[in-house]
Image (cartoon, rainbow, N blue to C red):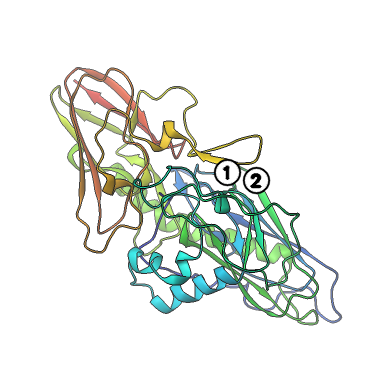
Amino acid sequence: MKGHRPVYLVVLVLVGVACTGSGNRGRAPAAQAFTVEVDGQADGFSAGFPAFFPDQVRVHPGDTVTVRLNAASGQPHTATLGTLVDAGVARLVRLGPQASLAAQESSPEMLRLPDAFPHSVTGGPQDANQSAAQPCYLDAGVPPLSLTGGAPACPRRDQPAFDGTQSFYNSGVLMATGDSFTVPLATTTKPGTYGLMCMLHRSAGIGRITVVPAHEPIPTPAEAAAAGRRQRQHLVDVLRPVAAAADRATPDDARAGAVDPTVPSALVTQFGPQTISIPVGGTATWHINGFHTISFGAPAGAGGSFLKRPDGSVHLNPEVVLPDRYQVPAAAFAYPPPDDGQPVAIDGGRWDGVGFRSTGLVGSYPPVLVTLRQTFTKAGTYPYRCLFHPAMAGAVKVG
């Protein structure tokens, strides 16, 4: 299960980040603090951004880079570096932009990177992989792995400075607005480009930290932050017509989430149309795009895919991730969808609108598309929402 998973990898090249900035000319500068934001919000519609802003930042040895969750959309994120991430990023680039999710995730390099979510609903304890969900710092080797969930946490240790040689250097999940993870770069870090990846969004959530010699000029932290804001605004502008088109959808072709296939690092997190009107005995059909729940009659405050316990462990929230009153095929919960997969249909049958029912957290990306059909037998207005994305809500008016 994921927030938003692309079919291919797109790396945006930021104007102004790769070039030299106005600061740090001449002698080696003092250490600087850079901020890279993840996620965010859009004006006028609900959206999620499983991307780093800026997705490329140039720094010196001894600087710090803080990854900060900006305006959380409900999707958790991690900030993860290390030689295993470098290998995974390189593999995705070699596979190319047309590679399927199955080709990406079945590569040996990506299989050595734990996912906070399980990839299968069968054969495991159906819980988070602690090696991705909790902080993990390994000098060498591979973290505990499981495709079916429940992998244990890494050995606990104090966070070291990142010197580019560690195999796995992971924040654990960032869930709430303002959550952050600061990476202190060792003064011994060799010049080079180091991959940054989210252990939930995988190929959608990729960035790069380029370390250059101390005497080379780089953009200032303010210039890098401004480039990140421009990058996110570009994605907002691309999504705006996608959101508008979803809101014009008909009841037999409604949307739960919407995407532009050319922009894997952003998605519309709203139902379209947000109000569906059908007669008594009528049927609404939603096509799910991304990872969402369709949940009627949810208790107040329900939401959030993870629950963090006082001991630091992170666990799946069964109220969100598991279906209730819907018979959902296992294929709707499998990640990645197989290349020869078939569309998945959830038939809710006839319903009088009484009580709670939820699909659970299902993922829908080509070639396996998930739809929900629900027939309403009683007049009334029935609110529903996505328990994964708290701003994502709609209503069905029957009468």
> Which mark, residue 175?
1
Image location of residue 214, percent across then percent down = 79, 79
Determine the secondary structure under disc 2: loop
Q: In this view, does 119 lie to the left or right of 136?
A: left
| Mark 2 neighbour class, 10 Å CA radius: few under 14, some 14 to 19, many 20 or more | some
Give me the residue at 46% from left, 36% from top. Answer: 391
Q: Is residue 22 left or right of residue 107?
A: right
Q: Are marks 1 and 2 in contact (CB under 8 Å)?
A: yes
Give the position of the C terminus as an image quadrant: top left
Q: Name the residue under label 2.
A: 179
Give the amino acid at mark 1. Answer: Met
Image location of residue 70, percent across then percent down = 60, 48
Image location of residue 122, percent across then percent down = 34, 46
> Which mark, residue 195?
none
Q: Give the Cα separation between the discs numbered 1 and 2.
A: 7 Å
* Residue placed most toward the observer, 366 or 236: 366
* Residue placed most toward the observer, 13 or 264: 264
